[in-house]
Image: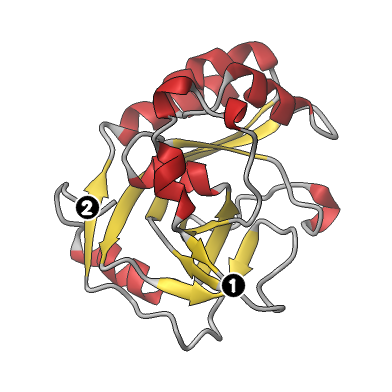
Amino acid sequence: MSGTGPSASDETLATARGCRVGLREWGVVCAAVAAGRQTVLLRKGGLADRGGRFEAEHDAFWLLPSTFHPDRDAIRDDAADLWELARGLRVGDRVTLPAFVRVLAAGHLADLDRLGGLAAFHVLTDAMVRTRFDYRRPGLTVLAVEAFVPDPLPAMTESDATGGCRSWVPFDGDATFAPPPRLARVGADPEAAAAAVLAATS
């Protein structure tokens, strides 16, 4: 999962090195983003989020693989190799942070028929996207992201303070997190993903 794309700008690297917040996401989705194969995140709120709703509170953050693993039919067949990449992201209470991302566009998607326009930018099956859309209350928050893979991959230690079913996880008190000296951009044309998100949510 090491980055082979162009190096991040000095500004992006400085932002990543100072960032101490993660977005909890399925490990296989984190692997997809880090591999440059997903540039749109489709979000629902966690049970511990305010009102159970997801809020796009940050425009730059680390991806934090969750302990929950979806069924294999949640991911398209052409992305099956990502399960192996995702498997090693959590070992005990140590969590590898496989990618740093910047949000290029965000919005609320309330029309199920518009989800098809985002299919090229994620690895979830149509059935899983519909299930996530309908969960609790219809709708999704969608984020188009530009992803950067750090070298070496940093890690943080999960604790009672960072646990729970919530989307945003601050880890500013984690002394084991070592900011990476290098970032490489991954993924082709995240600007196209941003345009698709804006079209789907307008």
Above or below: residue 29 compared with residue 10: above
Above or below: residue 191 compared with residue 33: above
Residue 3's mark? 2
- Which quarter of the figure is the C terminus placed in? top right
Residue 202 shows up from this direction: no
Q: Position of residue 120 (x, y in %)?
A: 42, 20
Residue 65's mark? none
First of labels 2, 1 by sequence position: 2
- Measured Cα–Cα span from mark 2 to mark 1: 25 Å
Kind of residue sitting beneath label 1: Pro
Tell me where residue 18 sits by quadrant: bottom left
Q: Position of residue 121 (x, y in %)?
A: 42, 27
At x 38%, y 55%, the residue is 99
Above or below: residue 142 compared with residue 173: above
Residue under label 1, please give it.
170
* Mark 2 in CB contact with mark 1 (< 8 angstroms): no
Q: State left or right for residue 92 relative to residue 189.
A: right
How dense is the environment of label 1, judged by Cα within 10 Å: few (below 14), some, or many (20 and up)? some
Q: Secondary structure at mark 1?
A: strand
How dense is the environment of label 2, judged by Cα within 10 Å: few (below 14), some, or many (20 and up)? many
Residue 6 shows up from this direction: yes
Given residues 154 and 83, the one toward you in this image is 83
Kind of residue sitting beneath label 2: Gly
Given residues 25 and 20, the one toward you in this image is 25
Q: Position of residue 28 (x, y in %)?
A: 50, 43
Residue extending furthest top?
113
Q: Secondary structure at mark 2?
A: loop
